[in-house]
Image (cartoon, coloured by chain):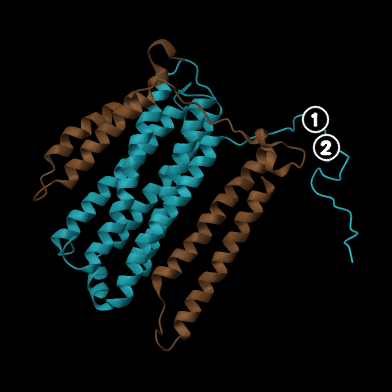
Chain colours: A brown, B cyan
Amino acid sequence: MKSNISILWILAVFCLILAGVYTFWNVIDPAHGRVEWVGTVALLLSAILSGFIAFYLRLVYRSQGGELPEDNVAANIDDADPEMGHFAPWSWWPFVLVGGASVVIIGISVAQEGNFWLAWFGAPIVLVALVGWVYEFYRGRFAH
Amino acid sequence: MANTRPQISHNGGVTSTSLNYAAKAPKINRPNNVAVGTIVWLGSEVMFFAGLFAIYFTLRSVAPEIWAHGTSVLNVPFALINTLILVSSSFACQAGVFAAERLQPRSTGPKPSQWGMVEWFFLTYALGAIFVAGQIWEYATLVSEGVALNSDAYGSAFYITTGFHGIHVIGGLIAFLLIIGRGYAVKNFGHKEASSAIVVSYYWHFVDVVWIALFLVVYVLR
């Protein structure tokens, strides 16, 4: 994890320097002469994005000392096969959720004069699917 | 003159096996995927809000006279109190996370030191809901004073930045309800439940920090 942390910090510093260069260049350029905010904000927050993830990984690294196979010269490729987490192979809830979300999005897309009537039919489906998915392993046979 | 260099290619002229390390599996201690994934997603949220801040600053730099009018009607003391309410909700949320890390979903007594995750998250929910209610009251007041989504560039920038933040807060409130529900539904509160409580707290702290940035930009810097 150490190399990931270093790379992200390098990216953060790079974006920070570029934000300064970009801002300064816009100000001294006679054709422009003022701060161009879109680029400045985007570069500055790109630095925050990288620094934020680096900072978090650093905390994780310090608290558990995790070493990834990428950091280990003796590791094999398949050591990096990750544990993807806990997913139900038979769950229908994601299907219901995207179905409901689609109805909501279509309802918003075809709305005329702010009348989202179709979206209101999708909203309860989204709600049911969300609750169903979150509590899939908290009820019935697999309650724990 | 003939080329006298020996022709050594990969596995051609080489007789030894390639360098081999110890056959034992390396010790791999992976971080929690849910937690790291949430942080990476929050990183993408940083860039989402970057777009909104860019809109705000660009419009502000090209239309300073609209800004002078729009910011003059803002109620800064009210927004400050609302900010403090949201910040205090983050502390309540963190106390709930500490309870979740103790694997304690419910309270063992009436004192706050005995509260479990559920009680702290209810408090967090209440504070967050007060914040949203305050935002709605502020919006209604501003609209009555002529700053609306469709009034001018300031109105658009103000409502799109604070409004998207408000939607994030509402999303967080729904997430807290689902986590509280898990606290009640589960029979053995374990690391899976603690994990989901912790990542919701990450999201909540993130939304809180974004609001502090928004408060500084919209109400202090103007």
Front residue of this view, candidates A132 and B104:
A132
- Please give the residue where the numbered disc 1 appears in the rendered image: B23
Q: Quadrant of residue B181?
A: top left
- Please give the residue where the numbered disc 2 appears in the rendered image: B20
Q: Is residue B101 left or right of residue B68?
A: right
Three-letter amino acid code of the residue under disc 1: Ala
Q: Is residue A82 left or right of residue B17?
A: left
Query: Who's the residue at 9% across and 49% down the image?
Result: A112
Q: CA distance from mark 2 to mark 1?
A: 8 Å
The reply to the same-chain question for discs 2 and 1 is yes
Where's the N terminus of chain A, which quadrant?
top right
Q: Is residue B176 visible?
A: yes
Give residue B50's position: percent from left, percent from top: 40, 60
Query: Who's the residue at 79% across and 29% down the image?
Result: B24
Front residue of this view, candidates B91 and B185:
B185
Q: Is residue A73 left or right of residue B181?
A: right
Three-letter amino acid code of the residue under disc 2: Asn
Give residue A76's position: percent from left, percent from top: 71, 36
Q: Secondary structure at mark 2?
A: loop
Question: Against A60, is B196 above or below?
Answer: above
Q: Secondary structure at mark 1?
A: loop
Residue neighbourhood size for the residue with mark 2, other residues' Cα within 10 Å, grouped as few (<14), some (14–19), many (≥20):
few
Q: Quadrant of residue B67?
A: bottom left
Give the residue furthest to the front: B1
Q: Is residue B29 visible?
A: no
- Kindly identify which chain the residue marked by label 1 belongs to: B
Question: Against B66, is B163 above or below?
Answer: above
- Kindly identify which chain the residue marked by label 2 belongs to: B
Number of numbered tags placed on the structure image? 2
Give the residue furthest to the bottom: A30
Query: Who's the residue at 52% across and 29% down the image?
Result: A85
